[in-house]
């Protein structure tokens, strides 16, 4: 298994296609949530994915500070096979990437409510009450970096 982290400009057409295909299949089709999945944040973000042979196993989008929040952010967290540890592995790599590359003291995310425990295991703490984003309950969470 390989973890790849690239800025949008470094991604090949094939990588972009695989990433968008996975994101749309989960966030739009599986969750039955029609919204603009591909947005203007993609070109200014880093994209990290876990790959085995030619198969995409997990994906996250790393957003630099000052774009979505004052601090850095991670979003679009997807694992093709749940409960195998792929999401946790990739999130830990994303956190390390942020610590190594950005001058920020924390990471803020908007977590789907069902995934709060997953993010708490990584050290995130809820900092908001639940709110609806595209008719899906979310909670804003923050990880303070050491």
Image (tube, rainbow, N blue to C red):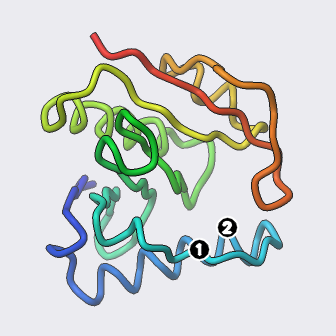
Which residue is drawn at the image coordinates 81% and 33% (left, top)? Answer: 130
Proximity of marks 2 and 1: CB atoms separated by less than 8 Å = yes
Residue 27 numbered mark, or none? 2
Residue 35, compared with residue 47, is above or below; it is below
Q: Which residue is mark 1?
A: 37
Measuring from the top left, give residue 39's x and y in whole percent. 49, 74
Secondary structure state at the residue bearing disc 1: loop
Measuring from the top left, give residue 49's x and y in whole percent. 34, 59
Residue 86, compared with residue 95, is above or below; it is below
- Tell me which label, 2 or 1, sits earlier in the chain: 2
Which residue is drawn at the image coordinates 71% and 34% (left, top)? Answer: 139
Residue 134, compared with residue 82, is above or below; it is below
Secondary structure state at the residue bearing disc 2: helix
Q: Quadrant of residue 114?
A: top right
Q: Determine whether, in the image, residue 25 is placed left or right of residue 11.
A: right
Question: Where the C terminus falls, by quadrant?
Answer: top left
Mark nearer the viewer, 2 or 1: 1
Measuring from the top left, give residue 10's x and y in whole percent. 14, 73
Tell me the CA gap for discs 2 and 1: 7 Å
Measuring from the top left, give residue 30's x and y in whole percent. 76, 71
């Amino acid at each position: 298994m390989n973890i790849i982290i690239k800025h949008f400009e470094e991604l090949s057409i094939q990588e972009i296609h695989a990433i968008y295909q996975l994101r749309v299949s989960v966030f739009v089709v599986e969750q039955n949530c029609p919204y603009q999945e591909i947005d203007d944040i993609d070109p200014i973000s880093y994209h990290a994915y876990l790959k085995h042979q030619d198969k995409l196993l997990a994906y996250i989008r790393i957003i630099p500070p000052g774009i979505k929040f004052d601090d850095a952010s991670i979003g679009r967290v997807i694992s093709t096979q749940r409960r195998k540890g792929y999401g946790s592995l990739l999130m830990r790599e994303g956190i390390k990437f942020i610590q190594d590359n950005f001058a920020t003291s924390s990471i803020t995310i908007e977590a789907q409510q069902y995934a709060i425990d997953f993010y708490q295991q990584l050290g995130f703490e809820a900092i908001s009450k639940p709110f609806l984003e595209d008719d899906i309950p979310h909670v804003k969470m923050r990880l303070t970096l050491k």
